[in-house]
Amino acid sequence: MRKRKMYLSVEDIAELFGLSVSFAYRVVERMNADLASKNYYVILGRVPTRYVEDNESYQYLSEQEKGRDRIQERNEYRQLIHDNIEYEILCQSYGTGRVEELVELMLDAICSTKTYQQINGEAVPTQVVKSRLLKVGYEHIQYVFFSLDRSTSKVKNIRQYMLTVLYNAPATINQFYDAEVRHDMYWGKDIPDR
């Protein structure tokens, strides 16, 4: 049986309220100030679990601050994605518009507040989607564009289709290229020399 924590750390508060760790520090600071003003013993960087449960601790965040924190988080993930996919090089090859569409789609999925997201027609936990999309690199985006350019099927929901392709890219890229090589090698053997 898991023992209940007496104190919550900054990381716990960040996870509990869905905040970035840097912003959670400010929230814990405010909670500690409130506790100190009520003559409670304060441990810096920690808040009693009971205090968080008994109070509407989310009151320490104004709507404006919550929005600002989400914007900051989105910008941090944007930079991470740009680094992962080698954004500048991709833009030179495929155009800024096409690459930016994929980046925005990935950001929407990564920063989603939903518990689950639809991928391959299935409800997938957002944390799993986030983890997979953060693994997408330069070669995966090339693979996505290659696949999209070759596709002749009518797509009803392009956003869902592209999100599914991005989600599956890290898991399918090696098998795809292996199949391509096997196909090319097979046909290469049957062509008679002239």
Image (cartoon, rainbow, N blue to C red):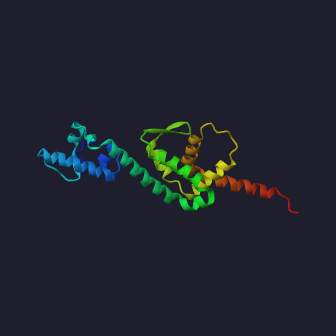
Image side of residue 14 versus residue 160, left or right: left
Residue at (25, 49) in percent of width and height: 28
Question: What is the quadrant of residue 142 in the picture?
Answer: bottom right
- Front-most of residues 173 and 74: 74
Residue at (18, 52) in percent of width and height: 43
Q: Is residue 125 visible?
A: yes
Question: What is the quadrant of residue 90 in the picture?
Answer: bottom right
Tally of marks: 0
> Residue 139, how many percent across, how many down?
58, 58
- Front-most of residues 125 and 148: 148
> Residue 144, how many percent across, how many down?
61, 51
Q: Quarter of the image for the C terminus: give it.
A: bottom right
Extreme front residue here?
Answer: 64
Q: Is residue 175 visible?
A: no
> Residue 2, how many percent across, how many down?
28, 42
Indicate whether 16 appears above or below 175.
above
Indicate whether 63 appears above or below 102.
above
Image side of residue 113 versus residue 92, left or right: left
> Residue 38, how many percent across, how many down?
13, 44
Question: What is the quadrant of residue 112 in the picture?
Answer: top left
Residue at (41, 41) in percent of width and height: 113
Q: Quarter of the image for the N terminus: give it.
A: top left
Extreme right residue here?
Answer: 194
